[in-house]
Image: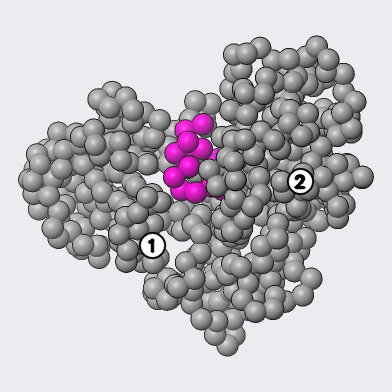
Amino acid sequence: MGVETADTFRVLIVDLEGIGRAPAGERFLRHELEARGIGPDVISVRSAGLTAQDGGPLHPRTVKAIEDRGADASGYTQRQLNRDWVDEADMIICGNGADRDEVAARFPAAAKKTFSLSEIFYLYEMVVAIAPLREHPALLMSRVAGADLTDDFDLPPMSHDPVELEARIEALADQIQRAAFWVATIWQSMLPEDPSSRPAMQPGDHQVDLVAFGVTVRVVCTGDAPYTLATLVDRTWLWLKAPAPHEGEPDVTISIAVYADEDARLQARADGWMTYETLSQAMHFLSSTVTVRAIDRRAGQLVMLHAAGLATPDGKVVGFVAPSGTGKTTISRTLGKHFGYVTDETLAIEFDGTVLRYPKPLSVITDRDARLKEQMPAHDLDLMRAPSSLSLARVVILNRDPDAGDEPVVEQMPLLHGLAVIAEQTSYITHLPAKLHTLADTVESVGGVWRVTYREAAHLVALVPALADGTVDLAEAEVPAAVGGVA
Protein backbone atom coordinates (compact mmCIF):
# COMPACT_ATOMS: atom_id res chain seq x y z
CA MET A 1 0.00 0.00 0.00
CA GLY A 2 1.27 3.45 -0.89
CA VAL A 3 1.33 6.72 0.99
CA GLU A 4 -0.65 9.90 0.41
CA THR A 5 0.12 11.97 -2.70
CA ALA A 6 -1.17 15.19 -4.20
CA ASP A 7 -3.91 13.16 -5.92
CA THR A 8 -5.07 11.32 -2.80
CA PHE A 9 -8.76 11.72 -1.91
CA ARG A 10 -8.71 12.73 1.76
CA VAL A 11 -11.74 11.78 3.83
CA LEU A 12 -12.29 13.05 7.37
CA ILE A 13 -14.95 11.49 9.62
CA VAL A 14 -16.12 13.70 12.48
CA ASP A 15 -18.37 13.26 15.49
CA LEU A 16 -18.78 15.13 18.76
CA GLU A 17 -16.57 13.23 21.21
CA GLY A 18 -14.11 11.32 19.01
CA ILE A 19 -14.24 8.14 21.10
CA GLY A 20 -16.90 6.07 19.33
CA ARG A 21 -18.75 6.76 16.10
CA ALA A 22 -16.05 8.59 14.13
CA PRO A 23 -13.18 6.24 15.06
CA ALA A 24 -15.37 3.24 14.23
CA GLY A 25 -16.23 4.84 10.90
CA GLU A 26 -12.56 5.44 10.16
CA ARG A 27 -11.46 1.89 10.97
CA PHE A 28 -14.39 0.17 9.22
CA LEU A 29 -13.99 2.30 6.08
CA ARG A 30 -10.24 1.68 6.01
CA HIS A 31 -10.92 -2.04 6.38
CA GLU A 32 -13.43 -2.08 3.50
CA LEU A 33 -11.14 -0.06 1.22
CA GLU A 34 -8.17 -2.31 1.96
CA ALA A 35 -10.32 -5.37 1.22
CA ARG A 36 -10.85 -3.90 -2.26
CA GLY A 37 -7.16 -3.18 -2.80
CA ILE A 38 -7.66 0.58 -2.37
CA GLY A 39 -4.71 1.97 -0.43
CA PRO A 40 -4.20 5.24 1.47
CA ASP A 41 -2.42 6.68 -1.57
CA VAL A 42 -5.81 6.59 -3.34
CA ILE A 43 -8.23 7.26 -0.46
CA SER A 44 -6.97 8.21 2.97
CA VAL A 45 -9.33 8.12 5.96
CA ARG A 46 -8.93 9.66 9.38
CA SER A 47 -11.26 10.89 12.09
CA ALA A 48 -11.60 13.55 14.76
CA GLY A 49 -13.99 14.74 17.44
CA LEU A 50 -15.23 18.26 18.04
CA THR A 51 -14.62 17.95 21.78
CA ALA A 52 -12.07 15.12 21.74
CA GLN A 53 -9.05 15.18 24.04
CA ASP A 54 -5.88 14.94 21.97
CA GLY A 55 -4.05 11.73 22.84
CA GLY A 56 -6.89 10.22 24.83
CA PRO A 57 -7.93 6.58 24.33
CA LEU A 58 -10.92 5.12 22.56
CA HIS A 59 -13.81 3.94 24.66
CA PRO A 60 -12.97 0.29 25.46
CA ARG A 61 -16.36 -0.89 24.18
CA THR A 62 -15.63 0.86 20.87
CA VAL A 63 -12.34 -1.05 20.61
CA LYS A 64 -14.14 -4.34 21.21
CA ALA A 65 -16.91 -3.55 18.72
CA ILE A 66 -14.37 -2.72 16.00
CA GLU A 67 -12.23 -5.79 16.60
CA ASP A 68 -15.22 -8.15 16.93
CA ARG A 69 -16.14 -7.19 13.35
CA GLY A 70 -12.73 -7.92 11.91
CA ALA A 71 -11.29 -4.40 11.69
CA ASP A 72 -8.17 -3.05 13.39
CA ALA A 73 -8.58 -0.72 16.37
CA SER A 74 -4.92 -0.67 17.44
CA GLY A 75 -2.90 2.51 17.81
CA TYR A 76 -5.85 4.87 17.84
CA THR A 77 -5.85 7.97 20.03
CA GLN A 78 -8.36 10.78 20.21
CA ARG A 79 -7.84 13.81 17.98
CA GLN A 80 -9.65 17.12 18.29
CA LEU A 81 -10.81 18.65 15.03
CA ASN A 82 -8.66 21.60 13.98
CA ARG A 83 -8.48 24.01 11.07
CA ASP A 84 -5.54 22.29 9.39
CA TRP A 85 -7.39 18.99 9.21
CA VAL A 86 -10.49 20.72 7.87
CA ASP A 87 -8.48 22.52 5.18
CA GLU A 88 -6.66 19.33 4.13
CA ALA A 89 -9.83 17.23 3.82
CA ASP A 90 -11.54 16.81 0.44
CA MET A 91 -14.71 15.43 2.05
CA ILE A 92 -15.96 15.50 5.64
CA ILE A 93 -18.57 12.96 6.76
CA CYS A 94 -20.56 13.29 9.97
CA GLY A 95 -22.82 10.70 11.53
CA ASN A 96 -25.81 13.03 11.63
CA GLY A 97 -27.03 16.46 10.65
CA ALA A 98 -26.45 18.02 14.06
CA ASP A 99 -22.74 17.18 13.97
CA ARG A 100 -22.53 18.38 10.35
CA ASP A 101 -24.07 21.73 11.31
CA GLU A 102 -21.70 22.11 14.25
CA VAL A 103 -18.66 21.46 12.05
CA ALA A 104 -19.86 24.08 9.56
CA ALA A 105 -20.55 26.58 12.35
CA ARG A 106 -17.08 26.21 13.86
CA PHE A 107 -15.26 25.98 10.52
CA PRO A 108 -17.21 27.89 7.82
CA ALA A 109 -14.79 26.72 5.12
CA ALA A 110 -16.01 23.17 5.75
CA ALA A 111 -19.63 23.89 4.82
CA LYS A 112 -19.18 23.11 1.11
CA LYS A 113 -17.66 19.69 1.69
CA THR A 114 -19.33 18.37 4.85
CA PHE A 115 -22.18 15.85 4.67
CA SER A 116 -24.29 13.84 7.04
CA LEU A 117 -24.34 10.09 6.51
CA SER A 118 -27.87 10.27 5.11
CA GLU A 119 -26.82 12.95 2.64
CA ILE A 120 -23.97 10.77 1.40
CA PHE A 121 -26.32 7.89 0.68
CA TYR A 122 -29.17 9.81 -0.90
CA LEU A 123 -27.03 12.21 -2.92
CA TYR A 124 -24.97 9.40 -4.41
CA GLU A 125 -28.25 7.84 -5.53
CA MET A 126 -29.11 11.07 -7.33
CA VAL A 127 -25.69 11.92 -8.71
CA VAL A 128 -23.73 9.90 -11.25
CA ALA A 129 -20.30 11.04 -10.10
CA ILE A 130 -18.43 10.52 -13.37
CA ALA A 131 -15.44 12.55 -12.24
CA PRO A 132 -12.36 12.14 -10.05
CA LEU A 133 -13.22 11.51 -6.42
CA ARG A 134 -11.89 14.91 -5.42
CA GLU A 135 -14.63 16.50 -7.53
CA HIS A 136 -17.40 14.50 -5.82
CA PRO A 137 -18.05 16.91 -2.92
CA ALA A 138 -18.88 19.74 -5.34
CA LEU A 139 -21.08 17.45 -7.45
CA LEU A 140 -22.96 16.20 -4.39
CA MET A 141 -23.26 19.65 -2.82
CA SER A 142 -24.78 21.01 -6.04
CA ARG A 143 -27.85 18.84 -5.32
CA VAL A 144 -28.28 19.50 -1.58
CA ALA A 145 -30.35 22.68 -1.82
CA GLY A 146 -33.09 21.25 -4.04
CA ALA A 147 -33.13 17.73 -2.63
CA ASP A 148 -35.84 16.44 -0.32
CA LEU A 149 -33.69 14.23 1.89
CA THR A 150 -34.67 12.20 4.93
CA ASP A 151 -32.32 11.48 7.82
CA ASP A 152 -33.01 7.78 8.25
CA PHE A 153 -29.35 6.81 7.73
CA ASP A 154 -28.09 9.24 10.38
CA LEU A 155 -26.48 7.82 13.51
CA PRO A 156 -27.83 8.54 16.99
CA PRO A 157 -25.31 9.96 19.48
CA MET A 158 -23.40 7.80 21.92
CA SER A 159 -25.26 7.10 25.15
CA HIS A 160 -23.91 8.03 28.57
CA ASP A 161 -26.33 5.70 30.34
CA PRO A 162 -24.23 2.69 31.48
CA VAL A 163 -27.21 0.36 31.12
CA GLU A 164 -27.94 1.47 27.58
CA LEU A 165 -24.38 2.03 26.42
CA GLU A 166 -23.37 -1.51 25.47
CA ALA A 167 -26.46 -2.18 23.34
CA ARG A 168 -26.14 1.26 21.72
CA ILE A 169 -22.51 0.68 20.78
CA GLU A 170 -23.29 -2.72 19.25
CA ALA A 171 -26.14 -1.30 17.19
CA LEU A 172 -24.04 1.66 16.10
CA ALA A 173 -21.14 -0.59 15.12
CA ASP A 174 -23.40 -2.71 12.91
CA GLN A 175 -24.86 0.36 11.23
CA ILE A 176 -21.46 2.00 10.71
CA GLN A 177 -19.99 -1.22 9.30
CA ARG A 178 -22.83 -1.48 6.75
CA ALA A 179 -22.37 2.16 5.80
CA ALA A 180 -18.62 1.68 5.35
CA PHE A 181 -19.23 -1.35 3.13
CA TRP A 182 -21.64 0.54 0.88
CA VAL A 183 -19.52 3.70 0.62
CA ALA A 184 -16.45 1.64 -0.26
CA THR A 185 -18.47 -0.20 -2.92
CA ILE A 186 -19.62 3.08 -4.44
CA TRP A 187 -16.13 4.55 -4.53
CA GLN A 188 -14.58 1.39 -5.94
CA SER A 189 -16.96 1.55 -8.89
CA MET A 190 -15.87 5.12 -9.60
CA LEU A 191 -12.09 4.71 -9.43
CA PRO A 192 -9.68 4.32 -12.36
CA GLU A 193 -8.35 0.80 -12.83
CA ASP A 194 -5.23 -0.36 -11.01
CA PRO A 195 -3.79 -2.87 -13.52
CA SER A 196 -1.46 -4.31 -10.87
CA SER A 197 -4.45 -5.69 -8.94
CA ARG A 198 -6.27 -7.10 -11.99
CA PRO A 199 -7.21 -10.77 -11.38
CA ALA A 200 -6.30 -13.37 -13.98
CA MET A 201 -9.10 -14.71 -16.17
CA GLN A 202 -9.85 -18.37 -15.39
CA PRO A 203 -11.45 -21.18 -17.41
CA GLY A 204 -15.21 -20.74 -17.28
CA ASP A 205 -15.04 -16.95 -17.08
CA HIS A 206 -16.62 -14.94 -19.90
CA GLN A 207 -15.78 -11.56 -21.39
CA VAL A 208 -17.52 -8.80 -23.33
CA ASP A 209 -15.51 -6.22 -25.30
CA LEU A 210 -16.82 -2.67 -25.58
CA VAL A 211 -15.63 0.66 -27.02
CA ALA A 212 -16.42 3.85 -25.09
CA PHE A 213 -15.51 7.08 -26.95
CA GLY A 214 -12.35 5.51 -28.31
CA VAL A 215 -11.39 3.55 -25.19
CA THR A 216 -11.25 -0.24 -25.50
CA VAL A 217 -12.97 -1.84 -22.52
CA ARG A 218 -13.10 -5.51 -21.54
CA VAL A 219 -15.66 -6.70 -19.00
CA VAL A 220 -14.62 -10.03 -17.47
CA CYS A 221 -17.35 -11.99 -15.69
CA THR A 222 -16.97 -14.71 -13.07
CA GLY A 223 -18.99 -16.09 -10.17
CA ASP A 224 -22.06 -18.27 -9.84
CA ALA A 225 -23.22 -17.73 -13.44
CA PRO A 226 -20.56 -15.94 -15.51
CA TYR A 227 -22.24 -16.76 -18.83
CA THR A 228 -25.53 -15.27 -17.63
CA LEU A 229 -23.77 -12.12 -16.44
CA ALA A 230 -21.80 -11.77 -19.68
CA THR A 231 -24.95 -12.27 -21.75
CA LEU A 232 -26.70 -9.55 -19.74
CA VAL A 233 -23.76 -7.17 -20.25
CA ASP A 234 -23.63 -8.02 -23.96
CA ARG A 235 -27.31 -7.30 -24.47
CA THR A 236 -27.50 -4.21 -22.27
CA TRP A 237 -24.39 -2.59 -23.77
CA LEU A 238 -25.10 -3.77 -27.34
CA TRP A 239 -24.70 -0.35 -28.98
CA LEU A 240 -21.19 -0.08 -27.53
CA LYS A 241 -20.06 -3.61 -28.28
CA ALA A 242 -16.72 -3.81 -30.11
CA PRO A 243 -17.06 -4.98 -33.73
CA ALA A 244 -14.50 -7.72 -32.99
CA PRO A 245 -12.70 -8.96 -29.87
CA HIS A 246 -9.92 -6.58 -28.83
CA GLU A 247 -6.46 -7.60 -29.95
CA GLY A 248 -3.88 -7.58 -27.18
CA GLU A 249 -4.55 -5.85 -23.89
CA PRO A 250 -7.53 -3.46 -23.89
CA ASP A 251 -7.17 0.04 -22.43
CA VAL A 252 -9.40 -0.89 -19.50
CA THR A 253 -10.39 -4.21 -17.93
CA ILE A 254 -13.31 -4.42 -15.50
CA SER A 255 -13.38 -7.68 -13.51
CA ILE A 256 -16.79 -8.47 -12.01
CA ALA A 257 -17.79 -11.36 -9.77
CA VAL A 258 -21.33 -12.16 -8.67
CA TYR A 259 -21.65 -14.65 -5.82
CA ALA A 260 -24.63 -15.27 -3.57
CA ASP A 261 -22.36 -16.71 -0.89
CA GLU A 262 -20.69 -14.11 1.34
CA ASP A 263 -17.50 -16.12 1.86
CA ALA A 264 -17.10 -16.51 -1.90
CA ARG A 265 -17.51 -12.76 -2.31
CA LEU A 266 -14.88 -12.08 0.34
CA GLN A 267 -12.39 -14.38 -1.39
CA ALA A 268 -13.10 -12.92 -4.82
CA ARG A 269 -12.71 -9.40 -3.44
CA ALA A 270 -9.36 -10.36 -1.93
CA ASP A 271 -8.32 -11.68 -5.35
CA GLY A 272 -9.03 -8.32 -7.01
CA TRP A 273 -12.58 -8.78 -8.35
CA MET A 274 -15.31 -6.17 -8.00
CA THR A 275 -17.84 -8.33 -6.18
CA TYR A 276 -21.61 -8.13 -5.91
CA GLU A 277 -24.35 -10.25 -4.44
CA THR A 278 -26.80 -10.00 -7.36
CA LEU A 279 -26.81 -9.38 -11.09
CA SER A 280 -28.80 -6.19 -10.53
CA GLN A 281 -26.10 -4.79 -8.24
CA ALA A 282 -23.40 -5.67 -10.75
CA MET A 283 -25.20 -3.99 -13.65
CA HIS A 284 -25.97 -0.91 -11.53
CA PHE A 285 -22.32 -0.30 -10.67
CA LEU A 286 -20.96 -1.36 -14.06
CA SER A 287 -22.49 1.72 -15.66
CA SER A 288 -20.43 4.09 -13.51
CA THR A 289 -17.31 1.96 -13.81
CA VAL A 290 -17.26 1.85 -17.61
CA THR A 291 -17.92 5.58 -17.79
CA VAL A 292 -15.43 6.80 -15.20
CA ARG A 293 -12.62 4.54 -16.41
CA ALA A 294 -13.13 5.63 -20.02
CA ILE A 295 -13.18 9.27 -18.89
CA ASP A 296 -9.96 8.73 -16.95
CA ARG A 297 -8.23 7.29 -20.04
CA ARG A 298 -9.27 10.24 -22.22
CA ALA A 299 -8.54 12.96 -19.63
CA GLY A 300 -6.85 15.88 -21.36
CA GLN A 301 -7.62 14.50 -24.83
CA LEU A 302 -11.30 15.39 -25.05
CA VAL A 303 -13.74 17.94 -23.67
CA MET A 304 -16.15 15.73 -21.71
CA LEU A 305 -19.38 17.38 -20.60
CA HIS A 306 -22.00 15.95 -18.24
CA ALA A 307 -24.62 16.28 -20.93
CA ALA A 308 -27.23 14.46 -22.97
CA GLY A 309 -26.46 14.49 -26.68
CA LEU A 310 -29.02 14.30 -29.50
CA ALA A 311 -28.16 14.39 -33.21
CA THR A 312 -30.10 15.52 -36.26
CA PRO A 313 -30.02 13.26 -39.34
CA ASP A 314 -27.10 15.26 -40.78
CA GLY A 315 -24.99 14.63 -37.65
CA LYS A 316 -25.35 17.97 -35.87
CA VAL A 317 -25.31 17.40 -32.11
CA VAL A 318 -27.04 19.48 -29.47
CA GLY A 319 -25.55 18.97 -26.02
CA PHE A 320 -27.96 19.49 -23.12
CA VAL A 321 -25.85 20.17 -20.02
CA ALA A 322 -27.13 19.65 -16.47
CA PRO A 323 -26.06 18.12 -13.16
CA SER A 324 -26.73 14.41 -12.74
CA GLY A 325 -30.26 13.59 -11.77
CA THR A 326 -31.83 16.77 -13.17
CA GLY A 327 -33.35 15.65 -16.44
CA LYS A 328 -30.71 14.41 -18.90
CA THR A 329 -31.95 10.82 -18.95
CA THR A 330 -35.55 11.95 -19.43
CA ILE A 331 -34.41 14.26 -22.24
CA SER A 332 -32.58 11.34 -23.85
CA ARG A 333 -35.55 8.96 -23.56
CA THR A 334 -37.96 11.52 -25.00
CA LEU A 335 -35.91 13.22 -27.71
CA GLY A 336 -34.07 10.01 -28.60
CA LYS A 337 -37.25 8.72 -30.25
CA HIS A 338 -37.02 11.62 -32.72
CA PHE A 339 -33.27 12.25 -33.02
CA GLY A 340 -30.12 10.16 -32.88
CA TYR A 341 -29.21 9.12 -29.34
CA VAL A 342 -25.58 10.10 -28.73
CA THR A 343 -25.38 9.83 -24.92
CA ASP A 344 -27.37 10.47 -21.78
CA GLU A 345 -24.44 11.36 -19.53
CA THR A 346 -21.02 11.98 -21.11
CA LEU A 347 -20.72 14.10 -24.25
CA ALA A 348 -17.19 13.51 -25.55
CA ILE A 349 -15.93 16.24 -27.91
CA GLU A 350 -12.64 16.37 -29.78
CA PHE A 351 -10.90 19.74 -29.98
CA ASP A 352 -12.02 20.19 -33.60
CA GLY A 353 -15.69 19.80 -32.61
CA THR A 354 -16.07 16.14 -33.60
CA VAL A 355 -18.39 14.29 -31.21
CA LEU A 356 -17.77 10.66 -30.24
CA ARG A 357 -20.85 8.55 -29.65
CA TYR A 358 -21.42 7.01 -26.22
CA PRO A 359 -24.94 5.46 -26.39
CA LYS A 360 -24.72 3.72 -23.02
CA PRO A 361 -27.76 2.09 -21.44
CA LEU A 362 -29.94 4.60 -19.66
CA SER A 363 -29.90 4.42 -15.85
CA VAL A 364 -33.49 4.60 -14.63
CA ILE A 365 -34.84 4.40 -11.08
CA THR A 366 -37.53 1.73 -11.13
CA ASP A 367 -37.49 0.67 -7.46
CA ARG A 368 -36.45 3.29 -4.91
CA ASP A 369 -36.51 0.77 -2.07
CA ALA A 370 -33.92 -1.39 -3.86
CA ARG A 371 -31.61 1.64 -4.16
CA LEU A 372 -30.47 0.46 -7.58
CA LYS A 373 -31.01 1.87 -11.04
CA GLU A 374 -32.11 -0.41 -13.86
CA GLN A 375 -29.86 -0.23 -16.91
CA MET A 376 -32.17 0.04 -19.92
CA PRO A 377 -30.65 -0.58 -23.38
CA ALA A 378 -31.34 2.12 -25.95
CA HIS A 379 -32.80 -0.42 -28.38
CA ASP A 380 -35.36 -1.54 -25.79
CA LEU A 381 -36.52 2.08 -25.51
CA ASP A 382 -36.85 2.43 -29.31
CA LEU A 383 -34.28 5.19 -29.44
CA MET A 384 -32.80 6.18 -32.78
CA ARG A 385 -29.17 5.47 -33.63
CA ALA A 386 -27.05 8.56 -34.20
CA PRO A 387 -25.22 8.99 -37.52
CA SER A 388 -21.65 7.72 -37.63
CA SER A 389 -20.19 11.18 -38.29
CA LEU A 390 -21.07 13.78 -35.65
CA SER A 391 -20.13 17.38 -34.92
CA LEU A 392 -21.07 19.69 -32.07
CA ALA A 393 -23.66 22.30 -33.09
CA ARG A 394 -24.89 23.83 -29.84
CA VAL A 395 -24.31 23.70 -26.08
CA VAL A 396 -27.49 24.28 -24.07
CA ILE A 397 -27.96 24.35 -20.30
CA LEU A 398 -31.15 22.67 -19.12
CA ASN A 399 -33.39 24.58 -16.73
CA ARG A 400 -36.49 22.54 -15.97
CA ASP A 401 -39.20 24.67 -14.33
CA PRO A 402 -42.52 23.01 -13.38
CA ASP A 403 -44.18 26.43 -13.68
CA ALA A 404 -42.91 27.11 -17.21
CA GLY A 405 -45.34 27.34 -20.12
CA ASP A 406 -45.77 24.92 -23.00
CA GLU A 407 -43.32 26.90 -25.14
CA PRO A 408 -39.67 26.55 -24.08
CA VAL A 409 -37.74 29.79 -23.61
CA VAL A 410 -34.26 29.86 -25.15
CA GLU A 411 -31.80 32.49 -23.98
CA GLN A 412 -28.17 33.22 -24.67
CA MET A 413 -26.06 33.51 -21.54
CA PRO A 414 -23.13 35.86 -21.02
CA LEU A 415 -20.09 33.77 -21.84
CA LEU A 416 -18.40 33.97 -18.44
CA HIS A 417 -21.54 33.05 -16.55
CA GLY A 418 -22.30 30.22 -18.92
CA LEU A 419 -18.78 28.89 -18.66
CA ALA A 420 -18.99 28.98 -14.87
CA VAL A 421 -21.98 26.65 -15.02
CA ILE A 422 -20.53 24.37 -17.69
CA ALA A 423 -17.12 24.14 -16.01
CA GLU A 424 -18.80 22.49 -13.01
CA GLN A 425 -20.19 19.88 -15.42
CA THR A 426 -16.91 19.14 -17.21
CA SER A 427 -14.84 16.09 -16.31
CA TYR A 428 -11.10 16.59 -15.74
CA ILE A 429 -11.16 20.23 -16.81
CA THR A 430 -7.76 20.76 -15.15
CA HIS A 431 -6.26 18.19 -17.56
CA LEU A 432 -7.29 20.09 -20.71
CA PRO A 433 -4.37 21.68 -22.61
CA ALA A 434 -5.42 25.22 -21.73
CA LYS A 435 -7.98 24.33 -19.05
CA LEU A 436 -10.87 26.84 -19.08
CA HIS A 437 -9.60 28.40 -22.34
CA THR A 438 -10.01 25.04 -24.11
CA LEU A 439 -13.57 24.77 -22.82
CA ALA A 440 -14.26 28.37 -23.88
CA ASP A 441 -12.92 27.70 -27.38
CA THR A 442 -15.20 24.67 -27.71
CA VAL A 443 -18.26 26.59 -26.58
CA GLU A 444 -17.53 29.73 -28.61
CA SER A 445 -17.03 27.66 -31.77
CA VAL A 446 -20.74 26.74 -31.66
CA GLY A 447 -22.16 30.13 -30.77
CA GLY A 448 -21.60 30.40 -27.05
CA VAL A 449 -23.71 29.13 -24.16
CA TRP A 450 -27.50 28.92 -24.29
CA ARG A 451 -30.10 28.09 -21.70
CA VAL A 452 -33.53 26.57 -22.27
CA THR A 453 -36.26 26.84 -19.66
CA TYR A 454 -38.94 24.21 -20.12
CA ARG A 455 -41.59 22.23 -18.27
CA GLU A 456 -41.69 18.88 -20.06
CA ALA A 457 -39.06 17.18 -22.19
CA ALA A 458 -41.62 16.65 -24.97
CA HIS A 459 -41.83 20.41 -25.39
CA LEU A 460 -38.25 20.44 -26.69
CA VAL A 461 -38.80 18.12 -29.66
CA ALA A 462 -39.64 20.89 -32.13
CA LEU A 463 -36.78 23.02 -30.83
CA VAL A 464 -33.89 20.64 -31.53
CA PRO A 465 -33.56 21.21 -35.32
CA ALA A 466 -33.61 24.97 -34.83
CA LEU A 467 -30.96 24.74 -32.12
CA ALA A 468 -28.80 22.52 -34.31
CA ASP A 469 -29.13 24.79 -37.36
CA GLY A 470 -28.91 28.06 -35.45
CA THR A 471 -32.24 29.25 -36.83
CA VAL A 472 -33.90 30.08 -33.50
CA ASP A 473 -34.52 33.82 -33.21
CA LEU A 474 -32.25 34.78 -30.32
CA ALA A 475 -31.28 38.30 -31.28
CA GLU A 476 -32.55 39.99 -28.13
CA ALA A 477 -32.67 37.09 -25.71
CA GLU A 478 -30.02 37.26 -23.04
CA VAL A 479 -29.98 36.12 -19.45
CA PRO A 480 -29.25 38.88 -16.91
CA ALA A 481 -25.75 38.95 -15.49
CA ALA A 482 -26.89 37.47 -12.16
CA VAL A 483 -27.64 33.97 -13.41
CA GLY A 484 -29.59 31.78 -11.04
CA GLY A 485 -29.06 28.11 -10.32
CA VAL A 486 -29.65 25.47 -12.94
CA ALA A 487 -32.44 23.05 -12.11
| Circle on res. 38 | 1
Magenta region: 125-142
Helix, strand or loop: magenta stretch: helix
Q: Position of residue 250 (x, y in %)?
A: 63, 72
Quarter-wise, where is residue 237 in the image? bottom right
Q: Amino acid at mark 1?
A: Ile
Outermost right residue: 314
**Quarter of the rendering occupied by the C terminus:** top right
Asked if one can make out residue 199 in the rendered structure from this viewpoint, the answer is yes
Quarter-wise, where is residue 396 in the image? top right
3D distance between C-alphas at marks 1 and 2: 37 Å
Sooner in the amino-acid sequence: mark 1 or mark 2: 1
Residue denoted by label 2: 352
Relative to residue 401, is residue 256 drawn left or right? left
Q: Position of residue 372 (x, y in %)?
A: 56, 51
Q: Position of residue 129 (x, y in %)?
A: 54, 46
In the image, residue 348 sits, relative to residue 75, either above or below, namely above
**Quarter of the rendering occupied by the N terminus:** bottom left
